[in-house]
Amino acid sequence: MTLPPTDERNAAQSAHWNGPGGERWVSHQRMLDALLAEVAELLMERAAARAGETVLDIGCGAGTTSIALARQVAPSGRVLGVDISAPLLERARQHVPGGLPVEFALGDATVYPFEPAGADLLFSRFGVMFFAEPARSFVNLRGGLRPGARLVFACWREPRENPWLTPTSTFRGCPRSDPRIRDSSRSPPSRGSAASSNVRDSAPLSSSLSICPLMSPRAMASTVR
Ligand SMILES: C[S@@+](CC[C@H](N)C(=O)[O-])C[C@H]1O[C@@H](n2cnc3c(N)ncnc32)[C@H](O)[C@@H]1O
């Protein structure tokens, strides 16, 4: 299989997502989409994509969120899903309903040649947390956003706070009063992929997730410099 042009520091991730990681995700896609539906719902609500907008879905995988976004921006807008995994993009292309304004591109988001200042919204469900050097990757992503564009993504916090990696915890197990919840309105975002926000008090998932608040590219740029 030909691997996409990749920042050499992301080579191991590329091999993983074009190998066993990608195959596993393809085989369990329906189950994973069901498990992650609540996260998609939170992000879609936050992103509030509008008809006519151009959206980048980074690490779009099998395309579920790209398709949902395309329904919101149609008919005049468009969605570009970018992913480093050929098998996942093949899956994405298989299930796009005809007529939706969505395209998929194989590439490493760290070096992908985005149309300069072309997008209104950068969206990602767990697709921006595998970069070897997040700052470098986010600078490239920033280049694809027009002034005033929005950034909305979800990523896990530390492995010990990730219920998927903790056999004894359950996906919905964190109490709402969990002290790990940080409110981004009181503390500034830390790193590019670690801006934390308890997006919705009633959502137990948000206690172990980092969901980036809406930020202008300026704010994102100041996060990643
Ligand atoms: C956890 S999966 C999430 C997939 C999809 N966003 C979803 O929610 O179903 C992470 C995705 O990020 C992609 N990915 C990892 N590193 C990437 C990179 N450097 N550039 C683009 N995509 C990347 C993987 O191939 C994979 O599809």
Image: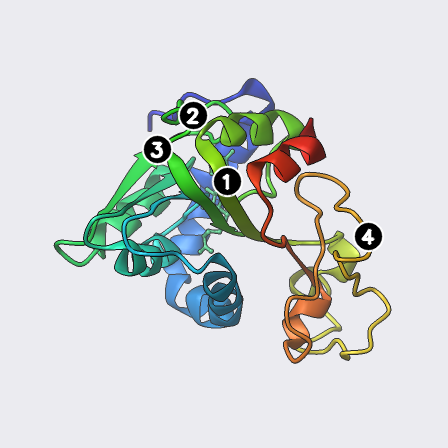
Mark 2 → mark 3, Cα distance in angstroms: 9 Å
Find numbered disc 1 in the image and state the secondary structure of the residue it sits on.
Answer: strand
CB within 8 Å, label 1 to label 3: no
Q: Which residue is mark 1?
A: 148
Q: Is residue 63 left or right of residue 192?
A: left
Find numbered disc 4 in the image and state the secondary structure of the residue it sits on.
Answer: loop
Tell me the kind of residue under disc 1: Gly
Q: Which residue is mark 3?
A: 106
Mark 2 → mark 4, Cα distance in angstroms: 31 Å
Q: Is mark 2 within 8 Å of ligand 1?
A: yes
The quadrant of the picture occupied by the N terminus is: top left
Q: Which residue is mark 4?
A: 187
Residue at 46% across / 34% down in the picture? 145
Residue 148 location (% of width, % of height)? 50, 40
Tell me the kind of residue under disc 4: Ser
Q: Which residue is mark 2?
A: 112
Q: Is residue 176 left or right of residue 12?
A: right
Tell me the kind of residue under disc 3: Leu
- Res 166 → quadrant: bottom right
The answer to whether 83 is drawn above or below residue 164 in the figure is: above
Q: Earlier in the sequence, mark 2 or mark 4?
A: 2
Find numbered disc 3 in the image and state the secondary structure of the residue it sits on.
Answer: strand
The quadrant of the picture occupied by the C terminus is: top right
Mark 1 → mark 4, Cα distance in angstroms: 22 Å
- Res 55 → quadrant: top left
Q: Earlier in the sequence, mark 1 or mark 3?
A: 3
Q: Earlier in the sequence, mark 1 or mark 4?
A: 1
Q: Is residue 98 left or right of residue 120?
A: left
Q: Earlier in the sequence, mark 2 or mark 3?
A: 3
